[in-house]
Image (spheres, grey):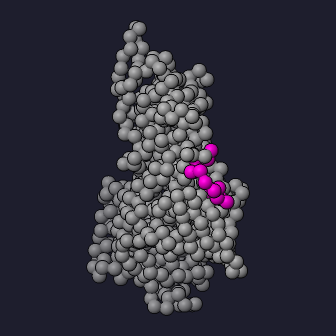
Amino acid sequence: MVNPVGRPAGPTPSIQVLIVGAGPVGLTAAHELARRGLGVRLIDAAPGPARTSRAVATHPRTLETYDQMGIVDDVLPRGRRNKAFTMYAGGRRRVRLRADYATMPTRYPYTLVIEQTETEAALRSAVARLGVHVEWGVRLADFTQDADTVRAHLVHADGREEVCTASWLVGCDGGHSTVRKRLGLELVGESSETWMLADVPVDTEVEPDSIYWTHTGGQALMMVPYARDGHWRILDTVPTPGADRPGRAQELLSAKLSAGLGHRVRVGEPSWTSVFTFQQRMVERMQGGRVLVAGDAAHVHSPASGQGMNTGIQEAYNLAWKLAMVEQGHAGAELLKTYSEERVPVGAALLGSTRTATTLVQLKNALAGVVLPIALHVVNTVRPLRRAVQRKVLGGMSGLKIGYGASSLTTADSRTFTYLADAGSVLMSARKPAPQAPGPGDRATAVRTPDALGPALRAFYAELRDPRWTLLLAAGGHGPGDVPVGVAVTAAAQYGEWLSVRTAGGSGPDGPAPLADPDRHLRTALGLLPGAWILVRPDGYVAARGSLLSRPALRRALAPLAPPVPLADEARREPGLLLRAATPDLEEH
C-alpha cells in the first residue's frame, strides 16, 4: 500500500532526508531536495564552515548544473574565468593550450577558478533561502534502517545524544565517511602519491590568465590564479620534507618555480599549506537500502584534474531528483537503482582519467627533462595536433562528455513514424533528428545555433531550471486526431506535478504552454520537425526523443519510471493509460 507521499504505510519519520556533511556535495543535495519540497535536515561534525579551500576548479558541466539550480549568477562573480593551460619546461614556455569547446557546445566555455570556501558560501546562502540551515557540531555516530525508515544516532558538540528518524540518509561526509563504513561499502583501489597544496601570494612575470604547468627538470608543479590579484594555488608534486613548515614553503616554492618558469619568482607567506597522501579508490555501489553516498564518500582520487568536487556535485544533483520522485510517489523505488547504475561507471572512468592526469602532471621520469621540450615543441607547431590535445584535455576535465546513453532510463532513438497528410491519404516517413542535435543520453544543452543568446534559447534554458522533467513538442505536427497535441495535453494533465509539457513555436491550439520560437532557432538546434518531441530529465540529459509524439512512444519513454496513476482500479494503474484513452484511434506500432 502506498500513502499520499509515496512511502510505505507505517510511522511517519520526523524528516524525509537526513544529509550528513555540509560541503559542496551535501549542500547541493540539500538544495535540490528542498527545491522539490522535501523536508531536509543537514548536519556536519565540524564546528563551523571550512576556512581553507581544497577544491578550486569548477568546470563547465558543473556551471551548467548551477544554472539549472538557479545559483550560477551568485557563483560566477566570486571566481576567475580561465580559458588556457600553459606548459613550461626547461625554463621556457613551450605551448599554450587555449579553450576549445567547438565539439562540446556550452554556455560556459571556461573553468571557473573559485575557492571552495566561496563555493560553499554561495551554496549555504541558496539552501538558507529554501529554509535549510546547517547544524554544525552534530556528528553521526551510527544508524540502523528497516524497510520504512532510517534511525540515526547523533551526538552534539555538548555531548547531548539524539535519535533522528528519517525516510532516507545521504552520506556526503568525505573520504573518511562514517556513512560508507557503517553501510559496509568498501573502497576498492590503490594508494597513490604524496603532494603539497599551498595558497600563496606570488610575484611572477606570468599573467594570471591561465593555469600553468611547469617542469623543473626533475619534477613538476602547477599554478592556478585566484580571483584575488597576486594570489595563487600551488601544487607541488614532490614536496621536500618539512616543506609545510613556516618560512620553508616560501623558500622551496620560490626556488622551484624560478627554475621551472625561467625567471625569478618570489613566493610570499602561505595562508594555508597541506601535505597529503591521496588515494585512488571507489565503491562498487552507492546505495544500501534507504542509505546512499555521494562525492568523496564514494570515491577518492588525485586532485590532478580538479574533478572531485565537480563529480560530487553532479552526483548529488543526479541523486536528489530521483530520491524526490520516489519519496513523493511519482516513481517506483526501482528508479533509485539507476543512481549507482549511472554514477559508478562515471566514478570508474574518473579514476582512470585522474590516474593518467596524475602521471602526466608529476612526470618524474628522468628522461622527461630531455624529451619533454621536444614533445611540447611538436604539439605547439603542428596545429591539428595542438587542437586535438586541447579538445582531449578539455573533454576529460569539463564534464561535458559525460552522458547516459547506456542508462536504463534512456530510450534509444528508434525513430517513430511521422504522419503527413497528402491529398487525403496518410503517408508515413521515418525522420532522423539533425546530425548535431542532442540524442538520448546527451546533454540537452549541447546545441549549436547561430542564435546562442536569442530569446528562444534563453527560454529553453529557463525551462531547464524547472525541477520537473520537460516534454518539449514541436508545433505543427498533425496526424489522426491531431495526435501529438492530444498526447501532449493529456500528459500535462496526467503528470503535471512532475512533468512540464511545453510546445516549441505556435500558439495555444498547437499544444500546451507555448514556448516562443519565431525563427525556429530552438527547434532547429534540437533537431525537431513538426510533431517531433524530446523528453529531458531534471538534470538536463535527454531521456528520449522521436519524430512523432504518440501515446506508445511516450509510454515507452516513461516506462522506466513506472509512475503511479492515482486511480483506484488496479487494472488502470498502467503508466500511460490516460494517454491511451486520449488517443483511441492511434494504432500501436
> Is residue 71 visible in this depiction of the protein?
no
Which quarter of the picture shows residue 284? bottom left
Asked whether, in this view, residue 59 is left or right of residue 167, the answer is left
Q: Nearer the viewer, residue 366 or 505?
A: 505
Number of numbered tags placed on the structure image: 0
Kindly identify the residue that appears in the image at 34 percent across and 56 percent down. 388
Kindly identify the residue that appears in the image at 67 percent across and 60 percent down. 14
Span colored in magenta: 4-16
> Is residue 497 visible in this depiction of the protein?
yes
Q: Main secondary structure of the magenta part?
A: loop
Which quarter of the picture shows residue 280? bottom left
In which quadrant will I find the C terminus?
top left
Find residue 489 and report its horizontal and vertical position in percent.
Answer: 56, 27
Q: Nearer the viewer, residue 417 or 15?
A: 15
Image: 329 above or below 11:
above
Find residue 432 and report its horizontal and vertical position in percent.
Answer: 36, 31
Tell me if residue 259 is in the magenta stretch.
no
Image: 170 above or below 437:
below
Kindly identify the residue that appears in the image at 28 percent across and 74 percent down. 371
Kindly identify the residue that appears in the image at 62 percent across and 44 percent down. 4
Extreme-top residue of the structure: 423
Find residue 247 and report its horizontal and vertical position in percent.
Answer: 57, 90
Asked whether, in this view, residue 284 is left or right of residue 197, the answer is left
Find residue 495 and report its horizontal and vertical position in percent.
Answer: 57, 36
Q: Nearer the viewer, residue 567 or 35?
A: 567
